[in-house]
């Protein structure tokens, strides 16, 4: 069973979907830690309710990204975390961390990358007037939403859609896709260098 840490900054609906999938026997993993950079984020409540320990930090209290990421790595090591799952974590991962967890960090993004990387991807799609957007799960590299893609699922955008009406459609896809992709990855070894991990 894979031991994972989930990194999140907000509501944590994807965090919840992952722990629910584990509970339901659909995902063979154990969430050993939540890492959160926003002390008021609702995801912390979700972790408490599920009995999952949290490491909560504020970036502004550290000298540098390297300083807080060094602490995060210590926490991950303490808990034997093998794999890192970003789920609405609003920070780029630094080079030292990437090196430590090479090929073992994934992210979910609410667009069909490479379209609409960065913040407010749902609003970006609405403003661009595209007829289709979706969700991407990808390995994390030093860029913003740029690493090798693992899976994508599309959703059509109706003429009357707004950010508010598109968001629940995107979330519904994310909540199914992320646990399913993780399960496939883990059953194949869960490493970027494993060729099979990238062939679906
Ligand atoms: C999701 O839409 C995810 O794709 C993006 O951030 C959002 C997080 O939502 N990276 P939640 O906190 O999981 O509800």
Image (tube, grey):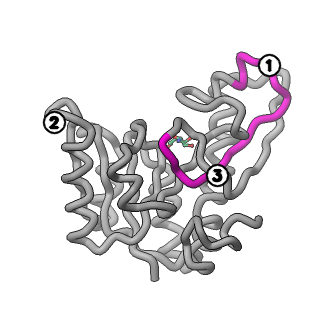
Nearest to N terminus: mark 2 or mark 1: 2
Judge whether 77 appears above or below 110 on screen. Answer: below
In terms of secondary structure, where does tag 2 sit?
loop
Q: Which sits in the foreground, 147 or 46?
A: 147
Q: Position of residue 69 (x, y in %)?
A: 26, 48
Residue carrying label 1:
129
On the image, numbered disc 3 is attached to which residue?
Answer: 148
**In this rendering, which labeled residue sits more in front, label 3 or label 1?**
3
The x, y position of residue 125, in whole percent, is: 71, 25
Residue 131 lies in the magenta stretch: yes
Q: Secondary structure at mark 1?
A: loop
Inter-mark Cα distance, 3 to 2: 30 Å
* In-image side of 71 versus 49 (left or right): left
Q: Which residue corresponds to mark 2?
A: 62
Q: Quadrant of residue 110?
A: top right
- The magenta-colored residue range is 125-142
Quarter in which the C terminus is drawn: bottom right
Relative depth, front residue between 51 and 126 = 126
């Amino acid at each position: 069973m894979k031991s994972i840490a989930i990194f999140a900054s907000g509501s944590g609906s994807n965090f919840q979907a992952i722990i629910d999938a584990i509970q339901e026997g659909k995902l063979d993993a154990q969430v050993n830690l939540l890492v959160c950079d926003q002390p008021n984020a609702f995801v912390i409540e979700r972790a408490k309710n599920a009995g999952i320990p949290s490491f909560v930090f504020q970036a502004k209290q550290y000298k540098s990204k390297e300083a807080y990421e060094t602490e995060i790595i210590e926490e991950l090591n303490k808990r034997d975390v093998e794999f890192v799952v970003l789920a609405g974590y609003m920070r780029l991962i630094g080079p030292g961390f990437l090196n430590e967890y090479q090929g073992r960090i994934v992210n979910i993004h609410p667009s069909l990358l490479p379209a609409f990387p960065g913040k407010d991807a749902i609003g970006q799609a609405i403003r661009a007037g595209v007829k289709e957007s979706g969700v991407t799960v990808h390995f994390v590299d030093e860029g913003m939403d740029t690493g090798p893609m693992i899976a994508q699922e599309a959703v059509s955008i109706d003429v009357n859609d707004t950010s508010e009406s598109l968001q629940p459609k995107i979330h519904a896809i994310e909540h199914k896709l992320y646990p399913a992709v993780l399960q496939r990855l883990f059953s194949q070894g869960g490493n970027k260098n494993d060729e099979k991990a990238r062939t679906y």
